[in-house]
Image (tube, rainbow, N blue to C red):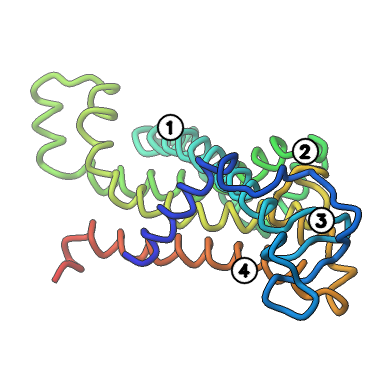
Amino acid sequence: MLGLMVIVAFTGIALAANWLAPYPAGEQFRDAFLAPPAWTEGGTSRFLLGTDPLGRDILSRLIVGTRVSLGIGLLAVVAAALLGVALGLVAGFSRGVLDAVLMRAMDVMLALPSLLLAIVVVAVLGPSLLNAAAAVMAVQVPHFVRLTRATVRGEMVKDYVTASRLCGAGSLRLAFRTVLPNCLAPLIVQATLGFSTAVLDLAALGFLGLGSQPPTPEWGTMLADSRAFLLRAWWVVTFPGLAILITVLAFNLLGDGMRDALDPRLRR
């Protein structure tokens, strides 16, 4: 529930970013380069969390960056779930060569470190926010494919599937109306946990300069732009890092809670 409350709060911030941000995310204040937070010595109430090396308000950039990080992460996870579930259903219902080819391809993708695979995809497509989302989607797809295939194979041997076949259900109806609804619980948990991985991977790509490009306020890019000032101005790195930490932790807590809630064997 704590993770859910944090996610709801961050979602509200992302939706109302234009009204909550004190200043435009790209506005520069040339009289306030690296201004410290308001509660520290030399701080001012104009900039509650201080300013970055270019004189931009960190609070405003964090608020607008919430929309970028969560929105692109949601896009990547939804696209990965749709593609992964479709391929998983194909692999689960088919036998022989098609199933073997699909699963060996997923094994090859899983054999590569996720960040390395994302970097390769972005290197091929070019650095941009949408290409980073495509890279994160490519990293997430194998997990959905394997989970869907395993769940479908487990459901196919049950009596209700046999009864549906005897009643004349076709392959598409059997897949989408009979089997898939009974596979949704683990897929929802995987999507929730995958969201935290997507936010982390997007931040990593932004930190490496392969994701969001300046002046777009994205948490990983904010870290990359400020790493040279880590010892001089701690606030320029601390607050974007805390935003990433809190978001990833909240989605992990929510994923664990949903697993317990959706699994009958774990219910109290």
Amino acid on which the number 4 mark rests in the picture: Leu
Label 3 element class? loop
Say whether disc 1 or disc 3 marks the residue closer to the N-terminus: 1
Give the label, 2 or 1, closer to the camera. 2
**175 left or right, relative to 125:** left
Which label number is shown at residue 242? 4
Packing grade of label 1 (10 A; few <14, some 14-19, many >=20) is some
Packing grade of label 3 (10 A; few <14, some 14-19, many >=20) is some
**258 left or right, relative to 109:** left
Callout 3–callout 2 Cβ contact below 8 Å: no
Residue 141 seen in render: no
Amino acid on which the number 3 mark rests in the picture: Leu
Residue 72 appears at what percent x and percent y? 60, 41
Say whether disc 3 or disc 2 marks the residue closer to the N-terminus: 2
Query: What residue is at 65 percent from the left and 40 percent from the top?
Result: 133
Amino acid on which the number 2 mark rests in the picture: Ser
Nearer to me, 138 or 18: 18
Residue 127 appears at what percent x and percent y? 81, 40
Say whether disc 1 or disc 4 marks the residue closer to the N-terminus: 1
Residue bearing mark 1: 86
Q: CA distance from mark 1 to mark 3?
A: 32 Å
Which label number is shown at residue 128? 2
Residue 210 seen in render: yes
Packing grade of label 4 (10 A; few <14, some 14-19, many >=20) is few
Residue bearing mark 3: 208
